[in-house]
Amino acid sequence: MIASLDQFVDEKQWQEVVEEIQRVGVETLNRSVDEADPGRVVYPHGVVTESKDPETHVDGAAVKRFETSGNVSDSTFGLYLRMPTAKGAMEHQNRSRSDMWEDAPLFNKFPKFKAFIEEQVIGKVLKEMGRIWVIIDRSGKDGIRHRDHTIPDVLNEFLWLRAGTAKTIQVFSEDSSAQPQRCTGHAGWFDPRYEHQAVCLDPDTPAISIRIDGPFTDEARKAVSDYQPWAPAASVGN
Ligand SMILES: [Fe+2]
């Protein structure tokens, strides 16, 4: 399931920010490794394997953790614009907590985006900012089909944004019997415990998306809860 959040994010104002994200995002990746900003990380494309080191959840249950391996030159880059400030911030259940994340130095290179979040996102879609990260893929390929986690009682709240049209995301049904659903607008949410995958729509353009973790406003939570899992694909586009 993918819930559209387009109605909460003004498309015209968002498009004015996209140019900055594309330009500064690619500039950041093009700097040498020696100049790498804190927060720039590389996720090699390749095989997803189940970790030998399962995560132990707060309730004591061991849950699966997934890892990737592959060729670093054919990679997805993540830029953290908010960095963890506390032990445990990276755990899935803590990614929305503003008290465990703070602005990264890299965030200052995106002044329009920063202002956009403060003025257009906070209070409208999310109550506060937890983790923010930008995902840039220059491989020209689709991303790895994966689940973020399988923790039963952790339902992540976040705003997923497309920066341009080179990329979207598709989410698969639990038993793969239905067609995967794709985000066709500019803003949305999905449950990352379902299998999902970035989709490359233009191999010549860096594929960029952003995930802003944070607790939903009451209005956004209602919009998301109105979506029934695996409603017919026609109801959200294809
Ligand atoms: Fe994911």
Image (cartoon, rainbow, N blue to C red):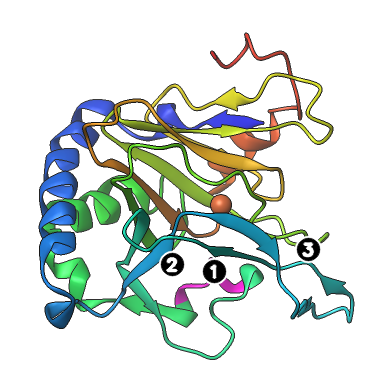
For image coordinates 45% across by 21% down, the residue present is: 184
- Mark 3 Cα shell of 10 Å, populated few (<14), some (14-19), many (≥20): many
Q: Which residue in the protein does label 3 denote?
A: 151
On residue 32, the disc is: none
Location of the C terminus by quadrant is top right
As helix, strand or loop, the secondary structure at mark 3 comes to loop
Out of 159 and 128, give the one closest to the viewer: 159
Compared to residue 105, the image places residue 213 above or below, namely above
Q: Earlier in the sequence, mark 2 or mark 3?
A: 2
Q: Nearer the viewer, residue 116 or 82?
A: 82
Left or right, residue 92 beside residue 99: right
Number of labels in the image equals: 3
Asked whether disc 1 touches disc 2, contact meaning CB atoms under 8 Å apart, the reply is yes
Q: Which residues are magenta?
A: 94-98
Tell me the SS state at disc 1: loop
In which quadrant will I find the N terminus? top right
Q: Position of residue 130 (x, y in %)?
A: 45, 68
The answer to which of 104 and 143 lies nearer the viewer is 143
Look at 21% across and 58% down and name the residue there.
114
Q: Is residue 40 above or below residue 171?
A: below
Alpha carbon of mark 1 to alpha carbon of mark 3: how far? 14 Å
Mark 3 is on which residue type? Ile
Mark 2 secondary-structure assignment: loop
Amino acid type for the residue under numbered disc 1: Arg
Return the residue at label 2. Answer: 131
* Residue bearing the label numbered 1: 95
* Disc 2/disc 3 C-alpha distance (Å): 19 Å
Instruction: Report if residue 174 lies within the magenta region.
Output: no
The answer to which of marks 1 and 2 sits earlier in the sequence is 1
Residue 105 in sight: yes
